[in-house]
Image: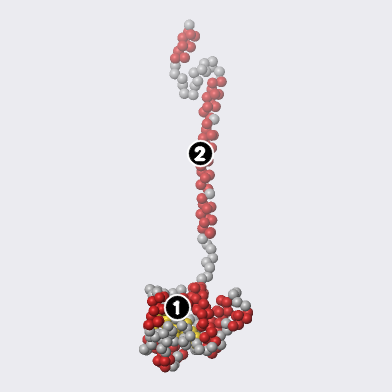
C-alpha cells in the first residue's frame, strides 16, 4: 500500500527541469540523455557565429590595389616641353623641315626635292623685337606704291595667316601704323559666311587680308580669291597661345597651311613673284 501511494504521488508531481518523467527506475540512463541534449548544440552554435567574420577580410586588399593604380607616370605634354624651352625666332629652315616631315610618308624622294624653296623667296625673319607694323615696314618698304597700283578685285596684295579669329583681330589692331589707307579684310570663319566674303571681294578692291588658313583655302577653292596678284604672304609664326603653342604646333592648322601652299603658293614662290615672311 505504501508503495502504491508513493508511485501515485511521484507520477502526479511536475517534471523537474532537465529530468525525464519516464526515468522512474532510478538507473543512470535518463541522466546521460539529458547531458547529451545540453552539450551537443553548443559547438554547432559557436561555429555559426564565427563564419560571418571571414567575409570582411577581402575589402582592405581592394583599396590597396586601387591606390596603386592611380600612381601612374604622367605623360609629358607639348605644353610642358614648350614651357621649358626658350623662345626662338622662326627661320626658313624651320618651314622647310616641317614640309619634309609632313610629306615624307606621302611623296617620293624626287617629289620631296621639288618642295625645296629658294632662299630668295623668303623675307627677313622677325628677331622677336618687332611689332607687326615695324616688321611690315622693314620687309615691305615700297608698300605705298604697290597699294596705289593695285586695282584688281577678288584679290589682295598681302595675306597674313594666323591660328584663330581672335588672333586675327589682334593683328589688325596692331598694324594701324602700317596699313594707312589700305583696305583690310577679315578672312576667318567666325560669324562670317563664305558667300558674304566672296561678295565683298567682288565689290571692292582689298589690299590686305588677315585670317585663318582654313577660310582662305575655302575662298580660293570657290574662286572668290585669286592668289596670282599676291605679293606677300606672312605667317604669324612666333606667337604662342595660352597653351604655349605656335600656329604650326597645332596639327589642324599645320595641315591647312600645307594644303593652302599646294594651291598655287609654292609655284608663285618658285617664280619669285611671291615672298614668304615669318613674323
Which residue is located at x 47 percent, y 83 percent?
Answer: 227
Name the residue rendered at 48%, 6% in the picture: 1
Percent x, y for residue 109? 63, 79
Q: Nearer the viewer, residue 204 or 135?
A: 204
Instruction: In this rendered view, identify the residue nearer to me: 110 or 63.
Output: 110
Residue occupied by mark 1: 219
Is residue 175 in view?
A: no
* Residue at the outermost top position: 1
Number of the front mark, 2 or 1:
1
Image coordinates of residue 113 in percent, x first then y, are 60, 82
Image x and y of residue 13, in percent: 44, 16
- Residue farthest to the right? 109
Q: Which residue is mark 2?
A: 49
Residue 271 as seen in the image, left or right of residue 183? right
Q: How is the image coloured?
A: secondary structure
In the picture, the disc for residue 144 is: none
- Label 2 vs 1, first from the N-terminus: 2
Q: Is residue 21 above or below residue 141?
A: above
Local packing at callout 1 (Cα closer than 10 Å; few below 14, some 14-19, many 20+) is many
Q: What element does badge 2 sit on? A: helix
Q: Nearer the viewer, residue 140 or 242?
A: 140
Q: Quadrant of residue 93?
A: bottom right
Q: Is residue 92 above or below residue 65?
A: below
Mark 2 Cα shell of 10 Å, populated few (<14), some (14-19), many (≥20):
few
**Residue 79: in sight, yes or no?**
yes
Picture coordinates of residue 122, whole percent (x, y): 51, 87
Q: Residue at x 56, y 80 (%)?
A: 97
Quadrant in the rendering for residue 199: bottom left
Q: Which residue sits at x=51%, y=60%?
A: 70
**Element at label 1:** helix
Q: Is residue 272 left or right of residue 137?
A: right
The relative height of residue 252 versus residue 36 in the rendered view (above or below) is below
Amino acid at each position: 500500500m505504501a508503495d502504491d501511494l508513493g508511485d501515485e504521488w511521484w507520477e502526479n508531481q511536475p517534471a523537474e527541469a532537465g529530468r525525464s518523467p519516464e526515468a522512474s527506475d532510478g538507473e543512470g540512463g535518463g541522466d546521460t540523455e539529458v547531458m547529451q541534449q545540453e552539450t551537443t548544440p553548443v559547438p554547432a552554435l559557436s561555429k555559426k557565429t564565427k563564419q560571418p567574420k571571414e567575409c570582411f577580410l577581402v575589402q582592405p586588399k581592394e583599396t590597396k590595389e586601387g591606390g596603386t593604380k592611380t600612381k601612374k607616370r604622367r605623360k609629358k605634354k607639348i605644353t610642358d616641353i614648350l614651357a621649358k624651352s626658350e623662345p626662338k625666332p622662326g627661320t626658313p629652315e624651320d618651314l622647310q623641315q616641317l614640309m619634309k616631315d609632313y610629306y615624307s610618308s606621302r611623296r617620293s624622294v624626287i617629289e620631296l626635292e621639288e618642295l625645296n624653296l629658294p632662299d630668295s623667296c623668303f623675307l627677313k625673319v622677325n628677331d622677336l623685337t618687332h611689332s607687326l607694323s615695324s616688321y611690315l615696314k622693314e620687309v615691305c618698304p615700297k608698300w605705298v606704291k604697290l597699294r596705289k597700283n593695285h586695282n584688281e578685285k577678288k584679290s589682295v596684295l598681302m595675306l597674313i595667316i594666323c591660328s584663330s579669329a581672335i588672333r586675327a583681330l589682334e593683328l589688325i589692331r596692331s598694324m594701324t601704323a602700317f596699313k594707312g589707307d589700305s583696305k583690310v579684310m577679315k578672312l576667318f570663319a567666325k560669324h562670317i559666311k563664305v558667300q558674304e566674303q566672296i561678295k565683298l571681294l567682288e565689290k571692292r578692291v582689298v589690299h590686305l587680308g588677315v585670317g585663318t588658313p582654313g577660310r582662305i583655302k575655302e575662298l580660293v577653292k570657290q574662286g572668290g580669291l585669286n592668289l596670282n596678284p599676291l605679293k606677300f604672304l606672312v605667317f604669324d609664326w612666333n606667337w604662342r597661345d595660352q597653351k604655349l603653342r605656335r600656329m604650326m604646333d597645332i596639327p589642324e592648322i599645320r595641315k591647312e597651311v600645307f594644303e593652302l601652299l599646294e594651291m598655287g603658293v609654292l609655284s608663285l614662290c618658285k617664280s619669285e613673284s611671291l615672298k614668304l615672311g615669318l613674323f
